[in-house]
Amino acid sequence: MKHALNHKPDYEKELRKAGVRITRPRRIILDILTSTEDHPDAMKIFHRAIEIDNSISLSTVYRTMNLLEELGAIHRHAFNGGPSRFEQAHGEHHDHLIDIDTGAVIEFKSDKIEKLQLEIAKSLGYDIVHHRLELYGRKLDRPS
């Protein structure tokens, strides 16, 4: 599932508002993040960036990702204890199914799950403030 966005996030604008200088390496990283449809980790972002400009350092990638996370522009996920992976923070709420064989991350939305979570929280005397659901699975073998 792709993000339910009609527009691309403007990470550059968010960083400028925070007083961060937009260097050429940082602009390349932001362009990669804006155009990605997966949940890349810092190393994938780094490898994509050095294909464009091999002078970009891994530390620049990490600093940029940390800044964007601090600003609430991206979410950091550590699926199954693996390396931190990132996705844009804007868009509709969704959950994740992680394929444990391939590492693929499948986004999904379920009104039934959302309703059940609210019912469970209410029955225990709570309001949900925030939640994150991650399912881990393996593709079912399909009979021929």
Image (cartoon, rainbow, N blue to C red):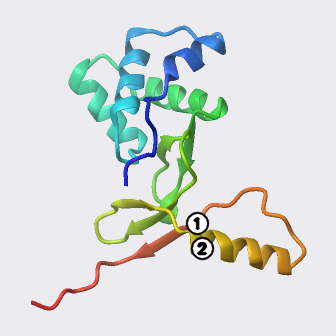
Give the quadrant of the N terminus.
Answer: bottom left
Give the quadrant of the C terminus.
Answer: bottom left
Mark drawn on residue 113: 2
Q: Residue 107, how many percent across, how many down?
A: 43, 59
State if disc 1 and disc 2 touch (CB < 8 Å).
yes
Left or right, 75 with reference to 123: left
Q: Nearer the viewer, residue 99 or 35?
A: 35
Q: Nearer the viewer, residue 105 or 143?
A: 143
Q: Is residue 131 above or below residue 30?
A: below
Q: Residue 29, how many percent across, how many down?
A: 39, 24
Secondary structure, mark 1, is loop
Mark 1, Cα crowd under 10 Å, few <14 / some 14-19 / many 20+, is: few
Give the spatial CA distance, label 2 vs label 1. Answer: 10 Å
Residue under the point 63% across and 68% down: 114
Q: Is residue 104 above or below residue 126?
A: above
From the image, tell me which residue sits under label 1.
133
Q: Dividing the picture into quarters, in which one does residue 106 lie?
A: bottom left
**In front: mark 2 or mark 1?**
2
The numbered mark, 2 or 1, whose residue comes first in the sequence reads: 2
Q: Is residue 110 above or below residue 59?
A: below
What's under tag 1, amino acid-wise?
Leu
What's under tag 2, amino acid-wise?
Ile
